[in-house]
Image (cartoon, rainbow, N blue to C red):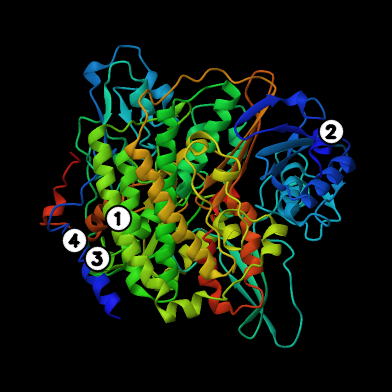
Amino acid sequence: MSANSAGERFATTGNGRALARSAVPELPAPELFDAVAAAIGGGLRVASFFGLAEPGSDDVGLFAVLADDRRARLHLGRTRVRGSGFDALTPVCPQVHLFEREIGEQFGLEARGHPWFKPVRFQRSLRPGHEVFGGPGGAGPEVGVTDFYRVEGDEVHEVAVGPVHAGVIEPGHFRFQCHGENVFHLEISLGYQHRGVERAMLGGPHKRSIHYAETLAGDTTVGHATAYCQVVEALAKCQKTPRAQALRGIAMELERLANHVGDLGALANDVAYLPTASYCGRLRGDFLNLTATLCGSRFGRGMIRPGGVGFDVDAAMGSDLLARLDAAERDTANAVELLWDAPSVMARFEDTGPVPKEMAEALGLVGPAARASGLPRDVRHDHPSGIFRFSHVPVSTWNTGDVFARAYVRWLEVQRSIDFVREQLRSLPPGEVRSPVGALAPDHVAVALAEGWRGELCHVALTDAAGRFERYKVVDPSFHNWTGLAMALRGQQISDFPLCNKSFNLSYCGHDL
Amino acid sequence: MIDVIRARLQQGHRTMAWPDGPPPPLAERFRGRPLIDASKCRSGCSDCAEACPTGAIDLQGGVRVDLGRCLFCTDCAAACPEGALSYGGDYRLAVRERAQLVAPSERELELAAALQGRLRKLFGRSLKLRQVSAGGCNACELDVNVLNTVGWDLSRFGIQFVASPRHADGLLVTGALSKNMLLALRKTWDAVPEPKIVIAVGACAISGGPYVDHPEVANGVEGTLPIDLYVPGCPPHPLTILDGLLRLVGQLEGRRGAEGVSAP
């Protein structure tokens, strides 16, 4: 697709920018869907696709955000749906499959022709009185009650797991269609963590908004809070100081470090390689404690605030952080590099749960899972904002798409994030850390992308005439990637599920909202 | 193999001395129990209560912070024109009664007392818990899980997380109790043999946390299951959780860890 045709059907903007809602052309649904399909065919991605109630009518607006990673552009398109549904785009564009199910569930619309149209979170509709998956009498859908895939045959059996799992982890339901040990298909049914955050964001910003952002996925507190603040700052035309931007970058990379190091330990644990499992379990805590030094919270609560950051770093704290970072780097390298030399580990990691590049691209995977399949996509590089415009983090990729690749990409990213944090701490620009944030522009839309440790976080806010959130849409990377896990399991042994699952380590709460 | 042994030597012994030795150092900016100097309050001022995202501050008869609702976020302290509110370094926050969490700041928190009688005899030296995550953000779960790492080594106290509720002595619940988890939580509870206990970890499980009064949640576990131990925080620090667990099973009695040490 040429840039010109995108210009006719979409409004073009960039990461962390706001524009008037009226600048986004409204197309008839078939035309928008054709344009989206053409754009995807031309190498763009769907970053977000969602519904919103159109005030003063019974219509539902549909809003699409396409990411052009090569040109650092975002294209926004919209349409309006009247009646009970729309013709699904999924058959020609699989990466919108969950978005269309979500639109159906949230606004009581049927995505006609969708090959697997069923609930996403088993939530009530955001448009009262319009339930597409509900029970009789306007009731909402009952969690876990839906049509699951079923493979028939004498020697085929079904294994159902969850929502309550054996470990200390979040709830979700998994159904495997198995032939002996081999998995034909895995279906993942979520929604157990649904707590109504998108609905509660409406009418904001209010005093809970930043706390909702910080708890969309607790392990991505800094990432989601950053995306939220970018949206607010874009709508309020707030300029952050260079110092605030550098401190946000430090917090973001510390969050990535803690989670990646923890994941490498957990992967080692799942193949019973206890040295790395034990050391990385401890080292994850060391990185979390660096974040706690910054802001008092191991998860970064209170660090990212609209207009900048909540806490500054003085010279003494800076050198303390640098010294501890050096020590953690030494021990992490020592612990992680054991993995690549252990035949028992490599035998389990290599060729397990492969996701080919073409499939990763078709499904719209993001983050380390996409990069492990050879897709060089990283918001810090493709759509840089804040400090990442000035200080570049190389994109880490691998090409085998298996558990090994997802582990190894994390290790590459750990090393690069440590370099980044060190560089930032050594050269913090002077200045204030927080700028005042005024009222939000009315009738505007803003999109923010941030590269959280799991991948792309996408927040979109549309304001009403009073400058309040009329719609707030969150896409956690898990929303894109859960299907990647399901596909990774095809043809694998069911006993490799824990390992494959850990290699993605997706968020339930970030998906369920 | 030689590399594995070398690595073992480099990584060293990491299990903390606490509770017989000092606790692990807490960050200077760590936010423990909120402290209120009500003498600084201007009459008629309600800035702190209005700033609180979860309605945790009650101004009737002095300023009282409900630790069961508190996110330890400092919005109140930032709003206070007189600097009357601050967060101390005391990580010890676990109690046995919900009402204790609304104690006025001038009174010491009545920290969790140990189980008594048969429960103490059964669980004092061996407590097996089934964890249920029910509508939160996964931060509490992560910092519960941290107790299994070598630094904390939870199993040295005879406390362990088990895979089946049928093997458990109780539940440790996190999350605001989403309506979508209500049935699963009840079924898990029913599967735990008597006698059994419930531990609510985090603001969500105690009160609903940031999601309090959302129609999608049940405002925590209260009213659904009988809670034996409340561990406040958003999320609570692992030390706060472990302190609560050890108090409950009576393993802090007479040890240095019972006294607690504040952050610097």
From the viewer's perspective, tell me whether residue A304 is left or right of residue A195. Answer: left
User: Which residue, given by chain and number where applicable, does mark 1 sit on?
Assistant: A328
* Element type where label 3 sits in the image: helix
From the viewer's perspective, tell me whether residue A307 is left or right of residue A179. Answer: left
Q: What subunit carries mark 2?
A: A
* Element type where label 2 sits in the image: helix
Disc 4/disc 3 C-alpha distance (Å): 29 Å
The residue positioned 41% from the left and 41% from the top of the image is A251
Disc 1/disc 2 C-alpha distance (Å): 51 Å
Q: Which label belongs to residue A65? A: none
Kind of residue at badge 4: Gln
User: Which residue, given by chain and number where applicable, does mark 3 sit on?
Assistant: B11
Rendering quarter of residue B214:
top right
Kind of residue at badge 2: Glu
User: Which residue, given by chain and number where applicable, does mark 4 sit on?
Assistant: B251
* Element type where label 1 sits in the image: helix
| Tags 4 and 3 on a common chain | yes
Disc 1/disc 4 C-alpha distance (Å): 32 Å
x and y, in percent, of residue A439 in the image: 56, 18
